[in-house]
Image (spheres, rainbow, N blue to C red):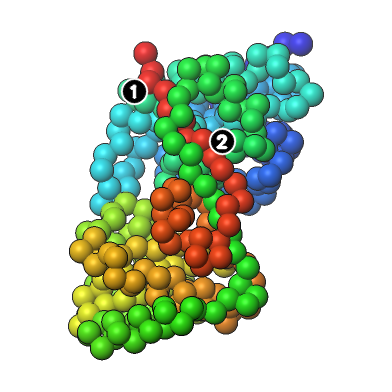
Amino acid sequence: MKITVQPYAPEHLDGVIAVLAQAMPRDPISPTRFTRQVLLDHNFRAEGACVACVGNYVVGFCLALARHLSLEIAPSDADCGYITLLGVTPSVQRQGIGSQLLQHAEGYLRSQQRQTVLISPYPPHYFIPGVDVKAYDSGLRFFKKHSYQEVYRPLAMETSLWDRQPPRWVQERKVQLEKEGMTFTFYDMDLTLALLEFAGREFGGDWVRFARDAMNAILKGDAPTRLAIAHQQGIVLGFSHYENERFGPIGVAATQRGHGIGKVLMYQTLQGMREQGLRTAWFLWTDDATAQRIYVDAGFKEVRRFALLRKELR
């Protein structure tokens, strides 16, 4: 069987989608989503999207990305490259195809002067935050065989919204915070600049994009409940966000943490989701400490665990 590895071309789309559907069955990707999230990414380069073929038949795909357009208000990652997708048709796995694809992907990242490869925390367009340690255990072994080391294991969580009600103590805490001058509200145009300033100052990078995109969507007709905001006389101190059933991000100013603001915002957001007819809330990425501190008491349960991986290129 003669394998050729070549840069992505338009005629590969259907074959790539088919390979990914077989190799990553827990994470199906439609052609529309692939086009939006991969091909329209500012940092996409065809030579970083490696396609393995037998004749004209696609049997493997690997997506490597080197950021050329920096994220807004984010630390530079000019020394990093990312691999966000890698799949080989199951019937031809363990024949070296994945290794060839990975070699080409790493070669592309070296050509872009990247010193580190990460799998796969690439904001804003990662698909999953690493390798699912249960669903893709063979993939985890594959990367470790190629000298990738685990950085840590983020987890995904979800909760049912059918009977979701804020605990009494959260309601009492909200009343107390309001007596102290805090205002809890959903998005108001008067808070636009204050929210952007808060997101940039406290978190930077992708958080600013989330806030801006959500405000744009609300102004085009989405429910204002997509953004729950805590502020004091117009100074934003925290916000919580959802998009369809995906919950988050949620964040509170560093100087204000530990006072229950985040819990109030979270339950306000979950209630807003219920009012929109949503019945499940989920998110892809948190750590164990945050899960125990915030989400477990709210009924969130772990549903997936990932391994975020790293390799230094020589």
Q: Kindly identify which residue carries mark 2.
A: 131
166 relative to 26, above or below: below
Q: Nearer the viewer, residue 64 or 145?
A: 145
In the rendered image, residue 31, in percent from the top left (x then y), is placed at 66, 47
Q: How many numbered badges does the structure rendering display?
A: 2
Q: Residue furthest top?
A: 2
Q: Amino acid at mark 1?
A: Gln
Residue 216 % position (x, y): 41, 71
Q: Position of residue 273 (x, y in %)?
A: 55, 75
Distance CA(mark 1)–CA(mark 2): 21 Å
Hey, which quadrant is residue 143 in on the image?
top right
Q: Earlier in the sequence, mark 1 or mark 2?
A: 1
Placement of 72 over or under 89, stated as above or below: below
Image quadrant occupied by the C terminus:
top left
Q: Classify mark 2: helix, strand or loop.
A: strand
Amino acid type, residue under disc 2 in the picture: Val
